């Protein structure tokens, strides 16, 4: 693509994106296609000869956009609602242009040093301890896996060198999570070869928070059985309900037994930048590591997850391997990203986060998160006031868990009713909700986290829900 061509199509593409955001409200949130529809419309073989850019862009409109579920839509309330933002998108554009592989300091000094500075800014915004050093991975799943690997390194059982199989000398390593923890922790445990048997799930209280007394008892019991407890993962902002585990009680238990405390704040960590929500991280100053996802609630395009770790030396010990062709004269003086994980090349992700933080400022980012929490509170108030609906869990931040409970419908039929309501709302294309199961009851989730969501969008989904309820009973 020649310079003039790139300039022309680049301008057109930026216009296309600006138009996309302007017309998003009118697009169906959930892709209105059947499985296989898109594949059937695409040629099975690659083009032999290059095609004009105009034809490619036309197919984006004709084929790709209808097959998108629009995560950027202001009425996307499913899973954890997230959103990109103008400065974040422009950051991604530059990252693609620079195409740096930030594996060593010298292969991208800008990426390495900007990452260190930007993550220290974020640490300050979240009120985290200065002993915490940040490093970027793609997702929280990967961040947590690396944290568990560092925790495993700390038990000094020569696992890096000798592995875990065929070793009668190695007791069963134990890691503890609550029943509400995200499945990524279990996947990390599987990936690291610890085995699902290593994972002990601790019950939660009525508000879905890890029961610290049950945790202490489980650790004692495991020690008596000859197991080797090594790590506890607490969640600040669980996926189903955004419940916050009692980290101030969990920390001392970890200290007593010398266990690594990892905090999964993938969703809720961003809220800690709002001064009045900072207390959600109470007790995290004792954590050995903590993950937070700016790609969830800090208006940074996917993907960008941050692991804060107090023991970068252990993370490095778990992963660093420097072959001759990667040796550099400055390696003892600088940080090289590839020393801290399984990847060699790393994307220049810090750029977009740096641009987002600079563009909005701490105060601007906090104001938006604060507004999302106000909207969630407003919605929860409507649920509480109505006799046809009930709240299913506390709503400390931007997520509300609720269900329809009209007097005319028996308890045994409420799961089916709520499922019908959710599918009705989602099929309308005007909003997207997701669900979970709480106290064995099908529960609807409304998550507010999109930068374009206004009170009007929240009112609209409330009307849609009530409309679907009227139709269903
Ligand atoms: N942890 C929690 C609490 C989550 O809610 C999620 C995703 O929603 C994850 C981890 C996994 O995030 P990622 O997609 O970045 O791996």
Image (cartoon, grey):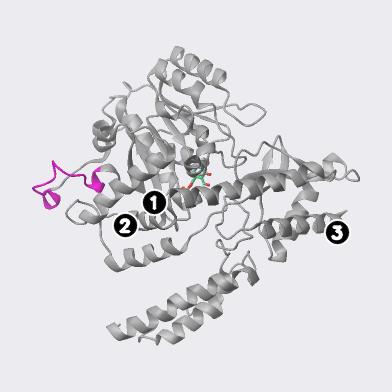
Residue range of the region highlighted in magenta in the rendering: 324-339
Residue 83 on image: x %, y %: 52, 58
Q: What is the distance, in whole Å, between disc 3 and disc 1 at their CAs?
A: 43 Å
In the rendered image, residue 329 lying in the magenta stretch gets the answer yes
Q: Badge 2 is on which residue?
A: 347
Q: Badge 3 is on which residue?
A: 471
Callout 2 touching callout 1 (CB < 8 Å) = yes
Residue at image x 55%, y 30%?
245
Disc sitting over residue 267 in the figure: none
Q: Badge 1 is on which residue?
A: 138
Q: Name which of mark 2 and mark 1 comes first in the sequence.
A: 1
In the rendered image, residue 70 lying in the magenta stretch gets the answer no
Residue at the extreme right? 408
User: Relative to 379, is 411 above or below?
Assistant: above
Q: Name which of mark 3 and mark 2 comes first in the sequence.
A: 2
**Left or right of residue 463: residue 157:** left
User: Relative to 373, is 71 above or below?
Assistant: below
């Amino acid at each position: 693509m020649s310079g003039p061509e790139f300039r022309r199509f680049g301008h057109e593409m930026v216009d296309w994106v600006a138009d996309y955001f302007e017309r998003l409200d009118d697009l169906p949130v959930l892709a209105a296609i059947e499985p296989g529809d898109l594949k059937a419309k695409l040629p099975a073989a690659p083009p032999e000869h290059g095609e004009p850019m105009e034809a490619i862009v036309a197919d984006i409109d004709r084929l790709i956009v209808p097959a998108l579920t629009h995560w950027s839509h202001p009425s996307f309330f499913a899973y954890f609602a997230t959103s990109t933002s103008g400065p974040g998108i422009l950051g991604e554009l530059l990252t693609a242009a620079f195409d740096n592989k930030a594996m060593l300091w010298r292969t991208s000094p800008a990426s390495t040093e900007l990452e260190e500075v930007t993550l220290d800014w974020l640490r300050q915004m979240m009120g985290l301890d200065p002993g915490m050093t940040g490093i970027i991975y793609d997702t929280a799943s990967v961040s947590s896996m690396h944290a568990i690997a560092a925790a495993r390194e700390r038990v000094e059982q020569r696992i890096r060198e000798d592995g875990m199989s065929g070793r009668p000398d190695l007791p069963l390593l134990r890691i503890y999570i609550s029943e509400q923890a995200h499945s990524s922790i279990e996947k990390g445990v599987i990936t690291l070869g610890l085995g699902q048997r290593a994972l002990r799930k601790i019950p939660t209280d009525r508000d879905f928070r890890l029961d610290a007394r049950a945790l202490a008892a489980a650790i004692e019991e495991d020690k008596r059985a000859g197991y080797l407890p090594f790590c506890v993962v607490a969640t600040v902002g669980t996926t189903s309900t955004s419940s916050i585990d009692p980290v101030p009680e969990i920390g001392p238990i970890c200290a007593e037994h010398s266990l690594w405390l990892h905090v999964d704040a993938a969703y809720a960590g961003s809220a800690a930048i709002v001064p009045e929500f900072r207390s959600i991280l109470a007790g995290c100053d004792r954590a050995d590591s903590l993950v937070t996802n700016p790609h969830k609630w800090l208006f940074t395009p996917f993907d960008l997850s941050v692991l804060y770790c107090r023991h970068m030396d252990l993370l490095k010990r778990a992963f660093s391997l420097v072959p001759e062709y990667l040796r550099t004269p400055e390696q003892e003086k600088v940080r090289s990203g590839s020393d801290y994980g399984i990847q060699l090349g790393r994307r220049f992700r810090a750029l977009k986060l740096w641009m987002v933080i600079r563009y909005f400022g701490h105060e601007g980012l906090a104001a938006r998160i604060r507004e999302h929490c106000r909207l969630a509170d407003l919605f929860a108030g409507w649920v509480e006031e109505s006799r046809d609906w009930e709240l299913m869990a506390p709503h400390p931040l931007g997520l509300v868990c609720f269900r329809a409970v009209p007097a005319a419908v028996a308890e045994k039929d409420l799961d089916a009713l709520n499922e019908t309501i959710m599918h009705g709302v989602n099929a309308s294309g005007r909003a997207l909700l997701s669900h979970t199961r709480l106290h064995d009851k099908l529960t609807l989730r409304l998550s507010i986290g999109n930068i374009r969501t206004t009170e009007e969008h929240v009112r609209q989904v409330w009307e849609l829900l009530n409309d679907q309820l009227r139709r269903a009973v």
